[in-house]
Amino acid sequence: MKEFITKNRSLLEETEELLNNQIKLEAVSSAIYLSMASWCEIKGYENSSAFLYGHAEEEKMHMMKIFRYVNEAGGHALQPEITGIPSDFKSLRSIFEDILDHEIDVTKSIHALVDHCFSNKDFTTFNFLQWYVTEQREEETLARRILELFDIIGEEGLGLWTIDQEIGKLGATGITSTVSPDQA
Ligand code: FEO
């Protein structure tokens, strides 16, 4: 098929590769959270499950924003291959500990990408990524806030049931969506 889009572009090949890596990381996030949502659902943690189903969708949106950006910038967004997602988890608390660790890794990846763009004077991609910088701060805050519930409420007796209720309320306040995707 005839190519009708000029190959001239500002996007560096290395930046395109890093953006494709970030696409994969966001897709992995979505897959992990979907798996966690399913585990919570079968264990009876209904609010945590609903929260994580929503979060899985949010991560897919994160992936798609970069996916579309890469192609619009003249690159080629690659559908990532995702394998090795766990389906069993130790406890509700371990799920949110894993989420905090994972989100800190995502933050580091975004920061490395931002640093790369700034060093290479790719201010367009640098600007695009600022939405993710803000989003990551919010995601880490939310994970920490949920983990605090386990210490404040405790897991004995009705503790886990109460924690699940509180996670539902935190999800409903939409702390993760104070930055609208439309603002990007
Ligand atoms: Fe899109 Fe939670 O990282």
Image (cartoon, rainbow, N blue to C red):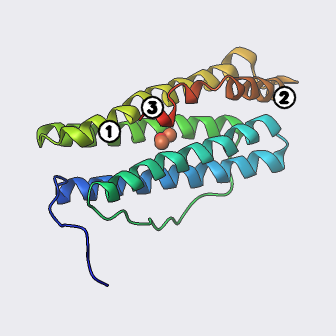
Residue type at the position of mark 3:
Gln
> Is 43 rendered above or below residue 20?
above
Kindly identify the residue that appears in the image at 48 percent across and 45 percent down.
62
Q: Look at discs 3 and 2 and give the one toward the viewer.
A: 3
Work out which quarter of the rendered image holds the C terminus and state it: top left
Residue at numbered disc 1:
128
Kindly identify the residue that appears in the image at 82 percent across and 50 percent down.
42
Residue type at the position of mark 2:
Trp
Q: Residues within 10 Å of mark 2 (few under 14, many from 20)?
A: some
Can residue 102 be seen? no
User: Is ligand 1 within 8 Å of the beta carbon of the residue shown at mark 1?
Assistant: no
Label total for image? 3
In the picture, measured across the screen, residue 8 lies left or right of residue 99, that is left
Residue at numbered disc 3:
183
Residue type at the position of mark 1:
Phe
* Of pointers 3 and 2, the one earlier in the residue sequence: 2
Which x, y percent locates residue 59? 54, 46
Residue at numbered disc 2:
161
Q: Residues within 10 Å of mark 1 (few under 14, many from 20)?
A: some
Judging depth in this view, the residue of 64 and 107 nearest the camera is 64
| Whole-number angstrom distance, CA of label 2 to CA of label 1 | 40 Å
